[in-house]
Image (tube, grey):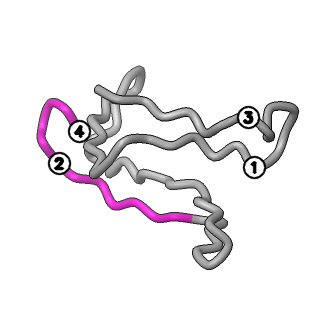
Amino acid sequence: MVNSGTEGPFNRKGAIDWAHYPGIIYIDIPKEERDKYLAVLEVKLDSLVELFKKYGKNADKEVVTQSD
């Protein structure tokens, strides 16, 4: 959490590592850190983000990456 520096646990669901399917990452916000109206999270990544575009109308286009 941005104000307190608390790190919330996270887990990944639906990933298939051998098939390179990334799955979805869920970040749990600790109950004591929740606000009635707003919670701000800071997410630090180890590398650039690569959008998974295996399916859908733009699946044949190249992977989009985002830098700082």
Query: Mark 3 or mark 4, which is nearer the start of the sequence?
Result: 4
What secondary structure is the magenta-colored segment mainly? loop
Query: Mark 2 or mark 1, which is nearer the start of the sequence?
Result: 2
Q: Which element is circle 4 on? A: loop
Q: Which mark is residue 54?
A: 1
**Residue drawn at the location 27% of the way across and 35% of the way down:** 42
Q: Quadrant of the C terminus?
A: top left
Q: Which residues are magenta?
A: 1-12
Which residue is at the front of the view, 44 or 21? 21
Q: CA distance from mark 4 to mark 3?
A: 36 Å
Q: CA distance from mark 2 to mark 4?
A: 5 Å
The reply to whether callout 3 and callout 1 are in contact (CB within 8 Å) is no
**Residue drawn at the location 30% of the way across and 46% of the way down:** 45
Q: CA distance from mark 4 to mark 1?
A: 32 Å
Q: Which element is circle 3 on? A: loop
The reply to whether callout 2 and callout 3 are in contact (CB within 8 Å) is no
Residue at mark 2: 6
The reply to whether callout 4 and callout 3 are in contact (CB within 8 Å) is no
- The residue positioned farthest toward the bottom in the image shown: 18
- Identify which amino acid the numbered label 3 is placed on: Lys
The reply to whether callout 2 and callout 4 are in contact (CB within 8 Å) is yes
- Residue 21, compared with residue 36, is above or below; it is below
Residue at mark 3: 61
Residue at mark 4: 1
- Residue 5, compared with residue 35, is above or below; it is below
Percent position of residue 30, x then y: 32, 51
